[in-house]
Image (tube, rainbow, N blue to C red):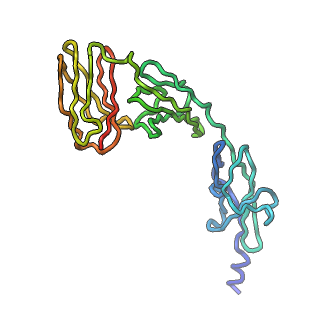
C-alpha cells in the first residue's frame, strides 16, 4: 500500500526555461537546445511541437530547423497521467551588413562598426588579425568575417591583392631567389645602386613571422637563408625600408 501511495503522489511535470534560444539568418538551430526542462523531474524526456496544445500531429520528429523569422514552439512533458507544456520563442537575429574592403597602399580596411573581426588569406585564418585594418602579408586573396553583438557573422567578398611596381624599393635594381621552389635553403641575391639598410621578413600563408633579419646591402649582395625547420608550404619574403618594399612568393618542397 505504501508503494502505491508513492506512485499516486508523484509530482507532475513543471516546465521552465533558463534562457531564450537564438539563431542567425541562414543558420540551422536545434530546438532541443532551448534550455527548457522539467523542474520537478529533471530526467524527464521532452518532446517539441509546432503549436499548442501539443499533439502527436504537430510533434517535431526532427528538432533541427532552419527558420527565417521569430518562431514559437511548444515543449511538452508527461509523467504518468500528468503533463505540462511551455511555449517559447526562437529568435532569429539579423546578420551584420556585408563589409567592403578598401585598399590604401599596403593597408586593407573596412568600417570600424562591428563587434569582432577575423581576416583570412587564401581562405585561411590570419593569426591575431582581429581589427578592422590589416597590413597585407603578400600577393593573394583576402577576405574578412565580421560579427555583431548577437555573434551573427558575414564574410566580405574576396579581394585579390598584388604588389605593383609602385611598391618597389628605390635604388634596388634586381632581387633573385635561387632556387625557388627550394628544399631547405635558398640564396637571396640583391643588386643595388648604393648602400641600403633593409628589413628582411619571411611569413607563412597565415601571416606568422618565421624569419626576420636586418640586412645591409651594397652593390652585389647575397646570402644563404636557411628555413630547414619550417614545414613545406607557401611563404612570402618581404624586403622593406622607408622608401618602399618588395615581396616574393616562395615555395618550400
In the image, residue 22 sits, relative to residue 226, either above or below, namely below
Q: Quadrant of residue 245?
A: top left
- What is the quadrant of the N terminus in the image? bottom right
Along the line of sight, the residue nearer the viewer: 36 or 118:
118
Residue 189 versus residue 93 in the image, above or below: above
Q: Residue at x 58, y 38 (%)?
A: 153
Instruction: Specify the quadrant of the image occupied by residue 246.
Output: top left
The residue closer to the viewer here, 124 or 36, is 124
Task: Judge by depth and name the residue closer to the eye, 25 or 103.
Answer: 103
Measured from the top left, where is residue 225 in percent x and y? 21, 34
Q: What residue appears at the point 68 percent right and 64 percent down from the top-left corner?
A: 46
Image position of 42 with respect to 159: above or below:
below
Q: Is residue 82 left or right of residue 201?
A: right
**In x, y percent, where is residue 110?**
52, 25
State the quadrant of the C terminus: top left
Residue 252, located in which quarter of the rendered image? top left
Query: What is the x, y in percent for residue 149?
Result: 58, 36
Q: Residue at x 21, y 32 (%)?
A: 187
Depth check: give the residue in front, 167 or 241.
167
Mark count: 0
Which residue shows up at 73% across the image and 43% down it? 69
Amino acid at each position: 500500500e505504501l508503494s502505491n501511495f508513492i506512485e499516486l503522489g508523484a509530482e507532475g511535470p513543471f516546465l521552465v526555461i533558463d534562457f531564450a534560444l537564438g539563431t542567425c539568418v541562414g543558420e540551422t538551430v536545434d530546438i532541443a537546445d532551448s534550455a527548457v526542462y522539467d523542474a520537478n523531474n529533471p530526467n524527464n524526456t521532452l518532446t517539441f511541437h509546432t503549436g499548442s496544445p501539443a499533439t502527436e500531429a504537430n510533434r517535431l520528429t526532427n528538432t533541427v530547423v532552419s527558420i527565417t523569422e521569430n518562431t514559437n514552439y511548444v515543449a511538452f512533458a508527461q509523467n504518468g497521467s500528468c503533463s505540462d507544456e511551455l511555449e517559447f520563442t526562437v529568435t532569429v537575429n539579423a546578420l551584420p551588413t556585408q563589409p567592403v574592403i578598401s585598399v590604401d597602399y599596403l593597408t586593407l580596411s573596412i568600417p570600424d562598426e562591428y563587434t569582432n573581426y577575423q581576416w583570412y588569406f587564401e581562405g585561411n585564418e590570419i593569426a591575431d588579425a582581429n581589427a578592422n585594418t590589416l597590413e597585407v602579408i603578400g600577393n593573394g586573396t583576402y577576405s574578412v568575417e565580421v560579427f555583431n553583438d548577437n555573434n551573427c557573422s558575414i564574410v566580405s567578398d574576396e579581394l585579390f591583392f598584388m604588389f605593383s611596381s609602385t611598391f618597389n624599393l628605390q635604388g634596388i635594381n634586381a632581387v633573385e631567389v635561387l632556387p625557388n621552389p627550394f628544399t631547405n635553403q635558398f640564396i637571396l641575391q640583391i643588386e643595388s645602386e648604393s648602400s641600403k639598410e633593409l628589413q628582411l621578413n619571411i611569413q607563412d600563408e597565415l601571416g606568422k613571422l618565421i624569419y626576420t633579419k636586418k640586412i645591409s646591402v651594397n652593390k652585389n649582395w647575397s646570402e644563404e637563408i636557411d628555413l630547414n625547420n619550417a614545414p613545406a608550404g607557401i611563404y612570402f619574403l618581404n624586403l622593406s625600408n622607408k622608401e618602399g618594399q618588395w615581396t616574393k612568393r616562395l615555395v618550400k618542397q
